[in-house]
Image: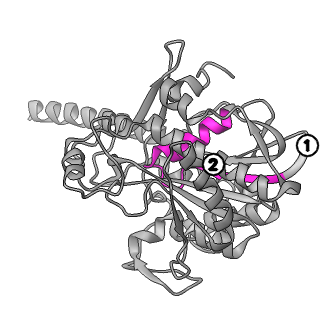
Amino acid sequence: MKATRTSGLVMLALAGILCFAAARDFRAMWARDRVFPAPGFRMEMLSKYLPSIKGTGVDTEVYVQEGPEKGGTVFVLGGTHPNEPAGYLSAVVMLENARVKRGRLIVVPFGNASGFTHNQPQEASPSRISFKLPDGSERSFRYGSRDVSPLIMWPVPDVYVHKASGQALSGNESRNLNRAYPGDPAGTPAERLAYAIMELLRRERVDLAFDLHEASPEYPVVDAIVAHEKSMEVAAGAAMDLKLSGIEMRLEPSPKKLRGLSHREWGDGTGAMPFLIEVANPSQGRLRGRTDERLVKTGLDKAYLKASGLGRLFVPYDSKGKPIEERVGRQLATVMSVVSAFSDFNSERGVVIEGVPAYEEMVSLGIGAFLKRQALN
């Protein structure tokens, strides 16, 4: 009896230790990754535009830099889907390097903040990805899920009905920020987050609005600019400029009947010209092998090499893979080309942004060269 009681107490103590360690790791997932904005940025919270999200898991940081000369306003949203790292890393690189000479730049690096607190179920994704800086130190970033956290949005319905259109989708899409626009100030956490972003675009009179994404190489709309009809002229000018620089980006029209997405609802419901930028990332695809940090960073997978040889992909793919430096460089080059084209077409609302690394710099030097040291305050 004594041995049984002692064994039971030992097992109970071990269970308590394991529960404490698991709870500590779980709580640590809610700590936001630190960023180090370039001089001139001020920080606000998205709840400024919808106070009901203040203190909730969907509230997130908004960074604003105004240039000395008046001009238009550019909005950059990263982290709509936190398992698409080139999207939020492009926003972080822009935030930590940009110098606005004319107009205004608004950056939201972690749009779906609660999506960074968990991984996509059954995908065996890495928890973090890290990058070496020139001084040998490291910066790491969380690799999350495309969905709003189930801890703040549960249960999900069997069928999600988009309120503004009545369009029926899979119930899982109810937690997808990029199916929730134009949002609802009294709706679900995803709908309230979407509404707050729409309010930001309206109140700040944003001219150009970018939503940064990644997709699988077998997806037809990849390495592409998806543009609303009112954005099409500017997008076409940017695509031509990119092509002359050796960067191929398809131009895709935003389908009028595909509702809930940023490239449609931002254009219909605000004065902004929306652009969704989609770049190829094998770690997003169904053909991939082991989903680890190496795959996320190099984009190299033998199954995709075979698929490329069979002509099953929509982008060129070879033994170089699709490294994250190339993906981030492509995102940033596209943003800057669109800003330049817009300024050519709209001289009175032109925007001039310096300091953002060029495509060639990003590919040759790597992301770490453009991230600030963790030790800085």
Q: Is residue 357 left or right of 62 when viewed as pictured?
A: left
Place of residue 246 in the rendered image (x, y in percent of width and height, measured from the top left): 51, 43
Residue type indicated by callout 1: Glu
Give the CA separation, mark 2 to mark 1.
20 Å
Closer to the N terminus: mark 2 or mark 1? 1
Rendered location of residue 269, percent (x, y): 70, 75
| Badge number at residue 335 | 2
Quarter the C terminus occupies: top right
Residue farthest top in this picture: 135
- Classify 41 as above or below 175: above
Taking depth in this image into account, of 91 and 248 the one nearest to the observer is 248
- Residue 30 lies, in percent from the top left, at 51, 43
* Residue sitting at the far right: 69
Task: Judge from the rendering whether residue 276 lies leftward or rightward of residue 9; answer left or right.
Answer: right
Give, as a three-letter code, the residue at label 2: Val
What's the residue at 73%, 65% (across, down)?
Answer: 272
For disc 1, the neighbor class at 10 Å (few under 14, some 14 to 19, many from 20) is: some
Question: Does the magenta-highlighted stretch encompass residue 138?
Answer: no
In which quadrant of the rendered view does residue 262 lie? bottom right
- What residue is at 45 percent from the left and 49 percent from the top? 84
Q: Residues within 10 Å of mark 2 (few under 14, many from 20)?
A: many
The residue to which callout 1 is attached is 69
Find the magenta span and give its range. 72-96
